Amino acid sequence: MEAGEMEAEPAIVKTAHDALDEICRAVEEIAAKILLIKKEGRPKSELRELNTQMALLFITLRQLNRTILVEEDHIKAETESAKAPVDFTTLQLHNLMYEKNHYLKAIKTCRDFRSKYPDIELVPEEEFFTNAPEDIKAKVLASEPAHNLMLKRLNYELFQRKELCKLHEKLELHKKGLVETIGSRKKFLSSLPSHLKSLKKATLPVQQQLGILHTKKLKQHYAAELLPPPLYIVYSQLMAQKEAFGEKIEMEITGSVKDAQTFSQQQASKENGTPSNMENIRLEDDAPDEEDDVQRRRKRPKKNLPKDNGDQGGILQTHPLKVIVRVFEDEDLQAKPLKLMSLKFEYLIKLNVVCVGVEDQEQLSDENILCNLFPNDTGTELPHQTAKLYAGDFLFFGDRSSSRPYMWAQHLAGMDFLPELPPLQRRSEDLKYELRSANISSGLSLYRHENRVQTVLQRIRSRKKAQLALM
């Protein structure tokens, strides 16, 4: 090829389908021309040539159609020949995929399998080689070393568990024996209080014969811990006077100990918010027996404070425990001195007042002995302003009252109050007031500055002796 000449384009090979398209277009053109001639009414000579061309085109069309069919059959044959290896390869692929899925499922099944070995916490290998018996370590259970070691460790674990089972059986037998021993001891301890009570009752005659009332004294001391502070002071002062100077008196605490325990717990819960149970348990263990309490109630019927016009809202509520003081003749040298009178000390909870009366209802004439034991102390009025304000103008203590709030009883209980008016104040319209103040000052001077308990007991004895002399 010379320079400047363009490169010849490669020959375009027409396929049978391209030739078929050209012939179809030529047939359409000739058919259009024939229709045009017929519409214009031209001579038929023009149609002959067109018919000849149309016939040639149909012949060529059939030839091309045959060629296309032959080529199609040839292509089908080639496709069929090429399809066989493809189908074989596809079948091999499906077989491989099936085998793959089978292996994957088998692997998953093996991985998901839960054997009993992983759940067993085996001892470390170092401990196994150190502590395992020689007969276990010397055995050959598998050809593979790792599997052989695992089986040996499993045998050692089984050996340990058998030993632990034997130890468990021994401990269970020992536990059973301890439970039986504890049960028998609990049974003995549960019956011990009744034995102790019977022992206490059995020793009472011996104590009375020897004059050592230890059991009764303990009960009185435990009951004294439940007394309210004023009655406790009265009890402690009288007990101290008796033990220090040999005073011829006897004290006894009467009333319901259980009610006193309940009242003490209620007061503790109000003040502290939590009741104290340790003291309650100790007092319940050494509290008076039910039989003694019932006999005491039968001997001494419960006496309430008499009320002239009725109790207003529980103002005259008394503490469950009371202190009984029996006064004996101090000049009598007999083994059993003469009892002069018995005093009963009560405590009014709401009014914070101590009342004193005669214990025996048959000796109501002894009330005159307590009245005006000290100058102008009749006991018909409340001793301090707080109680009067709380109770109002209501008069609680009349002539028939068996217990009265004497001022000397308040002093004996450790409660001193300021008087309503100054004792040295003078009033021109009432000359008796000055004389009364002087009498009170002189009459109570000995009582206030000297031994209160001794003074009260001396005055009671002197009045009772004078009454007996007159009778």
Image: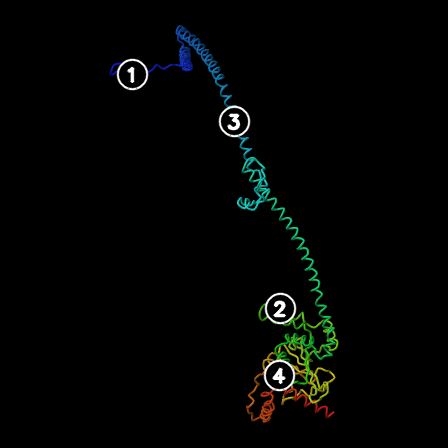
- Residues 296 and 353: in front is 296
Q: Which residue is mark 1?
A: 7
- Label 4: element kind: helix
- Label drawn at residue 278: 2
Q: Amino acid at mark 2?
A: Met
Please, which residue is most extreme toward the left here?
3
The N terminus lies in quadrant: top left
Residues at marks 3 and 4, CA–CA distance in whole angstroms: 115 Å
Q: CA distance from mark 1 to mark 2?
A: 126 Å
Residue at image point 71% right, 65% down:
191
How was this image coloured? rainbow
Question: Disc 1 residue type?
Answer: Glu
Q: Earlier in the sequence, mark 2 or mark 4?
A: 2
Q: Nearer the viewer, mark 2 or mark 4?
A: 2
Indicate the quadrant where residue 35 lies.
Answer: top left
- Marks 3/4 in contact by CB < 8 Å: the verdict is no
Mark 1 or 2 closer to N-term? 1
Q: Amino acid at mark 4?
A: Leu
Q: Is residue 265 above or below residue 83?
A: below
Instruction: Provide residue 367's location: percent of width, then percent of height.
Output: 69, 86
